[in-house]
Structures are given as structure tokens and as C-alpha cells.
Image (spheres, helix red, strand yellow):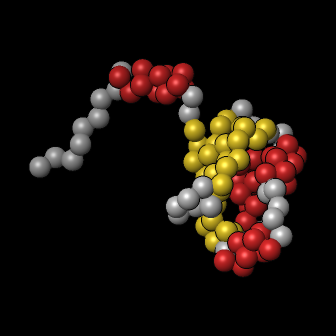
Amino acid sequence: MAFYMVQAAYTAEALATLAKNPQDRSEPVKQLIQKLGGRLHGFYFCFGEYDVVGFAELPDDSAATAFALAAVSPGHLKAYKTTKLLTVEETMQAMRKAGSLSFQGPSR
């Protein structure tokens, strides 16, 4: 399983709808992730460029892409971003691999 951070921003219309009819959006997100064989680890509303951030574990990049397509298709989001997260051990393995490699940059 892989870890992903998802950030999304609602359209003005979606925010107006949520203000008039408050809804716990974490539940439908959780259900969608579960249908893809994953697990929602956290769902937060936030200040800034994005309105929500979620942390999920999904089987693979294909499932993460399917989630993204399903999540944006209703049209209530104006921005959406997925970031694949690496565990410390995965990053340590990458560092070890990188340490055994050499690469020459552009010549002058």
C-alpha cells in the first residue's frame, strides 16, 4: 500500500452550499477510498490555497488516480492535488541507492 496526501479547493458555489447545509465530507471520501481498497487516515479543513487536506493509504497509483477522477468529476472542486508520500524507510532505501550512483551535470 502507498500513502498519499490529497489537497482540494471547493468552488464558491460548493462553499455556499456547505455554509447553508453543513455536511461532513469526510464520510463520502472515506467510503470512496474504501471502495478502492484503501484507508482514510485523516481529513482536515484548512486555511490557505486549499480548503481540505486528506491523508490516505491506497493500493497503488492507479487507485489514487481513480480516486482523483471520481472526486473531481462532480464539479464541486476548483483545484485538486495528489502528493505521493514516502515512508522514512522508503526514503532511506532511495538515499542508499542514490549514494551508490554518480551523475554528471551539463558541461560548460
Q: Residue furthest bottom?
A: 13
**Image location (x, y in percent) of residue 76:** 74, 71
Q: Residue 104 appears at what percent x and percent y?
A: 24, 38
- Is residue 50 among the parts visible in the rendering? yes
Residue 53 image point, x, y percent:
64, 51
Q: Classify 75 as above or below 92.
A: below
Q: Say whether residue 54 is left or right of residue 92.
A: right
The answer to which quarter of the image holds residue 16 is bottom right
Residue 51 in which image quadrant: bottom right
Q: Which residue occupies 57% across, 28% down?
A: 87
Residue at 42% x, 20% y: name it. Answer: 96
| Residue 80 visible to an observer of this rendering | no
- For residue 94, side relative to residue 26 (left or right): left
Tell me which residue sits at (56%, 59%) in the image: 47
Q: Quadrant of the N terminus?
A: top right
Residue 44 percent location from the top left of the image: 67, 49
- Image quadrant where residue 18 sits: bottom right
Residue drawn at x 21%, y 47% is 106
Q: What is the count of numbered marks? A: 0
Residue farthest left in this picture: 108
Residue 83's place in the image compared with 100, above or below, is below
